[in-house]
Image (cartoon, rainbow, N blue to C red):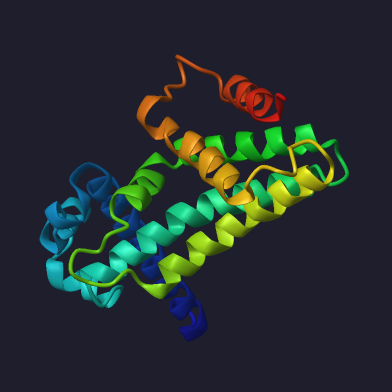
Amino acid sequence: MSAATDNVARAAARGGSRRLILDTAARLLRSGGYHQTTLREIAEAVGIRKASLYHHFASKEEIVEAVVNDGVRFVHDAVVAALEKTTGAPPGRRLEAAITAHLTALNGQRDYTTASFRVFTFGATPVPESVRAARRAYEDVWRNLIAELQAAGALPKERSPDLMRYLILGAMNGSIDWFRPGRFATADVAQEFSTLLLAR
């Protein structure tokens, strides 16, 4: 094996280990929250020594920050992709596509997304700016969509865009507590949510 190939192999292994650490941390944070989840617990669940975590992350806070940001990113990327695919479609169709994408990613990456909600408070440590920025960027997606819907007359222009955004995101994120695949179909929930929001 050449030196270059060996370096690529080592980099791939490091990347895989990093993702395994994050997957494990997300699962533990989802159930235990910030204070209950320790570096030792994460290391033991991964099957490595605690000291080995420091090859990938400088601290527990850095691991939590990565998990939280990934949780937001999974949903953000899915909604942006759905809106790009429905460019030029009727406003109601775009709203439904965005809701469907949000719910699908939210419940499909449940460890990350639930952890993202439950560990937003980093103990005594201030919430990292990257976490705030990721959330603001995703909220901007909905600000733009709501402005588009109001401009098209699909949503009343006299309604507060901020309150509308809080309502939509709160309703969707609340599904973490009650959504079960065997109980509801994502498409049906999205259609019902869209109908309720667009009803005059």
Residue 164 visible: yes
Looking at the image, residue 4 sits to the left or right of residue 200; the answer is left
Looking at the image, residue 190 sits to the left or right of residue 47; the answer is right
- At horizontal 54% and vertical 35% (from top left) the residue drawn is 103
Task: Decide: is 138 above or below 133.
Answer: above
- At horizontal 62% and vertical 36% (from top left) the residue drawn is 99
Task: Decide: is 61 above or below 178.
Answer: below
- At horizontal 74% and vertical 38% (from top left) the residue drawn is 156
Residue 108 visible: no
Q: Residue furthest bottom?
A: 3
Task: Decide: is 94 above or below 125.
Answer: above
Q: Nearer the viewer, residue 94 or 155?
A: 155
Q: Residue furthest top?
A: 183
Q: Nearer the viewer, residue 198 or 96?
A: 198
Q: Nearer the viewer, residue 58 or 146?
A: 146
Residue 52 percent across, percent down from the top left: 20, 71
Residue 117 percent across, percent down from the top left: 36, 49
- At horizontal 55% and vertical 46% (from top left) the residue drawn is 163
Query: Residue 13: which quarter of the image?
Result: bottom left
Q: Residue furthest front?
A: 158
Query: Residue 129: which quarter of the image?
Result: bottom left
Residue 200 percent across, percent down from the top left: 72, 25
Query: Residue 127: which quarter of the image?
Result: bottom left
Looking at the image, residue 112 sits to the left or right of residue 94; the answer is left
